[in-house]
Amino acid sequence: MKTEQIELPVATAEGNFMACYSKNGLARLDFPKVNTPASNIPAAGISTQIRLWHRITETALKAVLAGRAPRKFPPLDVVGTAFQKSVWNALRKIPAGQTRSYGEVAQAIGRPRAVRAVGGACGANPIPVLVPCHRVLAANKKIGGFSSGLAWKRRLLAREGVKV
DNA sequence: TCCGTATTGAACT
DNA sequence: AGTTCAATACGGA
């Protein structure tokens, strides 16, 4: 089976995010690398389905960047272990403007001692922002780490009115 | 099986 | 208050 993925830019105020779609849904979302030009979405070769997902993704992404919870999510075609999926699922339950510690997330998934594993799952999160891994802080409200750059984590938290 | 990790809390300077 | 350290769960090599 050819797992072809189509990469489309999502223009936001923060830059162009890159969204990767598989035939099953949104598979990955990357932070803007440089100031990538607002490239056009090629009209040809992209299914109506994917364009619909892309529209939803764009709306959801902008909502999160504005500090609000997205009204609607595109289908997520995430690749990961059962543990990782349960972590990501728990992350999506964190309301906008709130934070949790890694320990609390570990409790939420029924593995109170798996705090570090939670960190690992967060780092493996293919869809930042939409899966709000940035809302997970260390125990005493300290900024933890962030795969795609701590600057983004700080910016996202500030955007939601969270103080660290 | 060993190593690294986006942790944590306690014990020591 | 800053630093070190052991414990712990999981994924990748």
Image: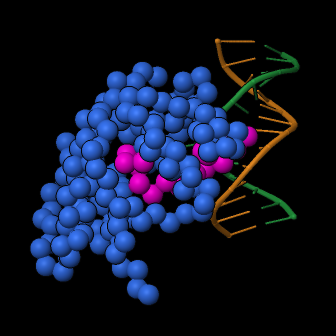
Chain colours: A blue, B green, C orange
Q: Quadrant of the N terminus of chain A?
A: bottom left
Residue B12 vs residue A109: left or right?
Answer: right
Q: In the picture shown, does residue A51 fall above or below A130?
A: below
Q: In the picture shown, does residue C4 fall above or below A37?
A: above
User: Which residue appears at 32% of the width and 38% of the height?
Assistant: A69
Q: Is residue A36 something that shows in the picture? A: no
User: Which residue appears at 54% of the width and 24% of the height?
Assistant: A141
User: Which residue appears at 36% of the width and 79% of the height?
Assistant: A4
Residue A32 vs residue A36: left or right?
Answer: right
Which quadrant of the structure image shows residue A56? bottom left
Residue A17 on the magenta segment: no
Residue in front for this viewpoint, B2 or A57 = A57
Q: Is residue A53 something that shows in the picture? A: yes
Identity of the residue furthest to the bottom in this view: A1
- Give coordinates of residue A102: x percent, y percent: 60, 36
Residue A96 vs residue A140: left or right?
Answer: left
Residue A24 vs residue A122: left or right?
Answer: left
User: Which residue appears at 14% of the width and 72% of the height?
Assistant: A42
Residue A125 on the magenta segment: yes
Residue in front for this viewpoint, A6 or A131 = A131
Which quadrant of the structure image shows residue C13? bottom right
Q: In the picture shown, does residue A49 fall above or below A124?
A: below
Q: Which residues are magenta?
A: A113-131
- Give coordinates of residue A91: x percent, y percent: 49, 43
Q: In the picture shown, does residue C7 fall above or below A163?
A: below
